Image (cartoon, rainbow, N blue to C red):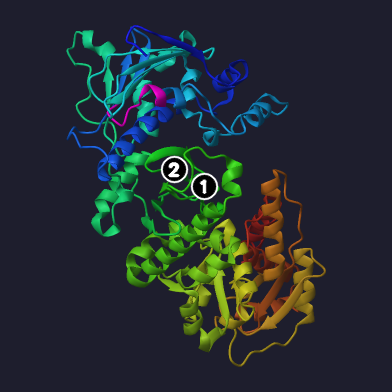
Amino acid sequence: MSDMNKTYGDISVETAHIFPIIKKWLYSEKDIFLREIVSNAQDAITKHKRLVSLGQTEDDETAYRITVTLDKTDKTLSVSDNGIGMSEDELLRYLGNIALSGALEFIQKYEGENAEDNKNGIIGHFGLGFYSAFMVADTVEVITKSYTDTPAVRWVCKADGSYELSTAERDSKGTTVILHVTDEEAAYLDAFKIRDMLDKYCSFMPTEIYFEDASAEDKDDGAGASEEKPVNDTFPLWQKLPSECTPEEYKDFYRKVFRDFREPLFWIHINADYPLNFKGILYFPRLNNQYESIEGQVKLYYNQVFVADNIKEVIPEYLLMLRGVLDCPQLPLNVSRSYLQNNTYVAKVAAHIVKKVADKLNALCENERETYEGVWDSIRPFVEYACMRDRKFYDRAKDSVLLHLTNGSYVTVAAYLESAKEKHENTVYYTTDREQQARYVSLFEDQGISIAIMEQLIDTQFVQMLESYDQTVKYLRIDADVATALTEENDDTTDNEVLTALFRKVSGKEDLEVKYRSFKDATLPAVLTVSEESRRMEEMMKMYAMQSGGEAPDFPIAYNMTVNNASPLIARLNTLASDEPTKAEMMASMIYRLSMLSQRKLSAEELSAFLSECFALLGTL
């Protein structure tokens, strides 16, 4: 091709079909075009480095760099590199011919009936990344010079697929891609937007990227057009060995990537070797309260190039509260959801992450116990949920599951059961509301019995899972079993039919089960209990109602009453039952309602009746 000649042609795919698809359906987000163009520049530099390392070309000792230039006046956005460059033949081969296998299938897919449903499909497999530029530009120029020192070439392509090829002026190797932005996409001529896109997609690319705003040269403030520093970190933290990273670096990286200024609870640095070959850092975020959203964010990278936010297929569903970055060079740069869902490599990555999370919990529990106890209450719902969803995870992490006791200490389940052997073997007692159940808590603690705190919605389901995994151990709320903590060794279980009838009358429950025992604490006249099974059923019904958005059906709770035969007040009530039945009924009602207060709040009707009875009884004194 002589210097004066120009060559004209058309892209060798039916452009009437392919270019409208590129503009409308190529990616779900138009912003990705900048990632594609900058990634191509990075590839050109990587190829040149490789040729230098193989001795096939000389290193000119020029620092590699990528420059993104915005010119609002000319309505252009340019990406320039000093990589391998292209000759005329290479340019025509790579850009003048969309040589994609399966192109017709691709076209049919995106112009077919399900085009709207398929618009999130990514087409990296078809080699169309460069043409994403036409989502925002009506003309794209490429000025390139090969490292072989062949003449520089200028290629100009229109949105209809027609192109013009001519000689160009360029002194050094490399490529510059110039996008002539359409009026409809003028938002991409804003410097703040371009910086934001570079920050999202190019923050960790391995070659320094500089942003220049040519439009700023004429500003009165003299700020200049060029950035003094690269916009990216070419050696991100995940590329280092864990031994080379300090806690402060991990925290700084977390703040920078996720813009969360709360310190993470802890982190897991993954450096998986062959055959998985991926790296990353995962963080357990700190939440303000249990009701805060637990949606995490795991960013997926391909050789330091951003691919997508929160790719759920790479992280098991039960660990989605994690935040972090994963760099998986064995995945293509552009991946579809269906590709991830059916890829064995992704499944192995997910399994490895599960193992590393369990290993980290075990290491913290064993070697940094004080730190682990400090974060346990925050991570407990996540760990419990993971154990419930994956038996393998439970088997790995079960020795690091802690019980938070009412005395403030933390113990493993095994340690709790070992210390409880003499008093209540193979039984774990717990409270779901320390304030509401304070009376029961104090009664148990007075007998030296430890109480676990399980006050979150997930806890009931979790203990049911634990019981299914080890059927020799039972978990009982403290108001489900008072015999162990309260009764004397010489237990008086003599029934009293008169008092039974009296308590059934004042409770309004003819089927109220009344038992008689001798409590160690004689000041306690009676307690109400509810069976563990009955209460769990009620909680399950409420949970299902919450999930479905409806109201929980009324579930009858079967309360049981245990009367203390050692109580002087019960002895007094027994006497009044025959001597002063009216006063006895008032006293029995008060005992019943006071016992109920340890179980739940009284209804408005119950409270009104209770207050009337109290005032009436006071009047008899």
Query: Looking at the image, which residue sits at the far right?
Result: 510
Asked whether residue 205 is in view, the answer is no
- Amino acid at circle 1: Tyr
- Amino acid at circle 2: Lys
Q: Main secondary structure of the magenta part?
A: loop
Asked whether residue 77 is in view, the answer is yes
The reply to whether the C-beta atoms of the residues labelled 1 and 2 are less than 8 Å apart is no
Q: Please check the rendered image and state whether residue 87 is part of the magenta-colored stretch, yes or no.
A: yes
Residue assigned mark 2: 299
Label 1 residue SS: loop
Label 2 residue SS: strand
Q: Please check the rendered image and state whether residue 249 is part of the magenta-colored stretch, yes or no.
A: no
Which residue is rendered at x = 58% and y = 44% of the image? Answer: 339
Per the model, the C-alpha gap separating discs 1 and 2 is 24 Å
Query: Looking at the image, which residue sits at the far bottom?
Result: 490
Mark 1 closeness class: few <14, some 14–19, many ≥20 residues within 10 Å: few
User: How far from the left and from the top, in percent, is residue 189?
Assistant: 38, 14
**The one of 554 and 427 positioned closer to us in this rendering:** 427
Mark 2 closeness class: few <14, some 14–19, many ≥20 residues within 10 Å: many
- Which quadrant holds the C terminus? bottom right
Residue 12 falls in image quadrant: top right
**The one of 166 and 309 positioned closer to us in this rendering:** 166
Q: Which residues are magenta?
A: 81-90
Residue assigned mark 1: 291
Q: Is residue 504 left or right of residue 603?
A: right
